[in-house]
Amino acid sequence: MIVAQNTSGQKSRLHKHNVNRVMVHLSPGTMRLAYEGKPVNDVKFNAGTVRWDPSGGMHTSENVGGTTYKIVEVELRKPGSPVTWPPKDPLAVAPKIYHLEFDNDQVRVVRVRVPAKGAIPQHEHATNRVTVALTDAKIQLTKADGSKVEATFAAGEPRWGMPDVHAEQSLVDHPIELIMIDIKSK
């Protein structure tokens, strides 16, 4: 995981990415991508936008939006493996809270919107994952054995997670929004 910050007018050197990436935009902006031999493309995004960024050719990127922006970049260094999602998968257990953004052979990306003081019944995360907080959050996790753990996230913070079974209870008086990136490699 990389948290990148680009100031207005900042332009990268000519480079390429050898791996696919998931990009979680923490703030709004406009990025100009100039690939060798291709038309220039301005990519506009809002805070909370999630994008799939495939590996590709030589290019520059430039912040042309007039403001500084931050992006969490999750690099995928291994090919994906097939995943059989369990019956207690979050998308099945809490479909009003967990919403599929996109799914491919390397990742499944889910947007999580928990209401203020909202609860999520017991569910199972089957893969390793990266969770990126879009808002501040404080959650109480009740593990499968009944033990309780509190987790606090600051907006913009990425965090690594492993397979787990738990229920969740929001401990804050505002809605919580997270991006959960299920990693399909072993």
Image (tube, rainbow, N blue to C red):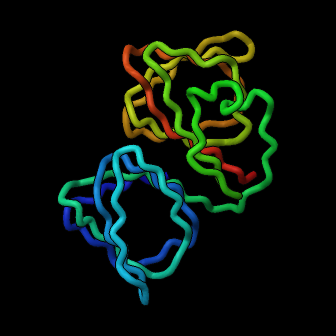
Q: Most extreme residue toward the top, as rendered?
A: 146
Q: How many labels does the image show?
A: 0
Q: Which residue is drawn at 23% across and 61% down?
A: 65
In the displayed structure, 22 sits above or below 163; it is below
In the displayed structure, 4 sits above or below 177; it is below
Question: Residue 81, position in %: x, y?
Answer: 77, 55
Q: Which of 140 and 121 is in front in this view?
A: 121
Side of 162 relative to 153 (left or right)? right
Side of 153 relative to 68 (left or right)? right
Q: Which residue is drawn at 51% across and 15% down?
A: 118
Q: Which residue is drawn at 68% across and 61% down?
A: 78
Q: Nearer the viewer, residue 60 or 3?
A: 60
In the displayed structure, 9 sits above or below 80; it is below
Q: Which of 81 and 95 is in front in this view?
A: 95
Question: Residue 157, position in %: x, y?
Answer: 42, 38
In the displayed structure, 150 sits above or below 103; it is above
Question: Residue 64, position in %: x, y?
Answer: 23, 66
Q: Residue at x 53, y 59 (%)?
A: 52
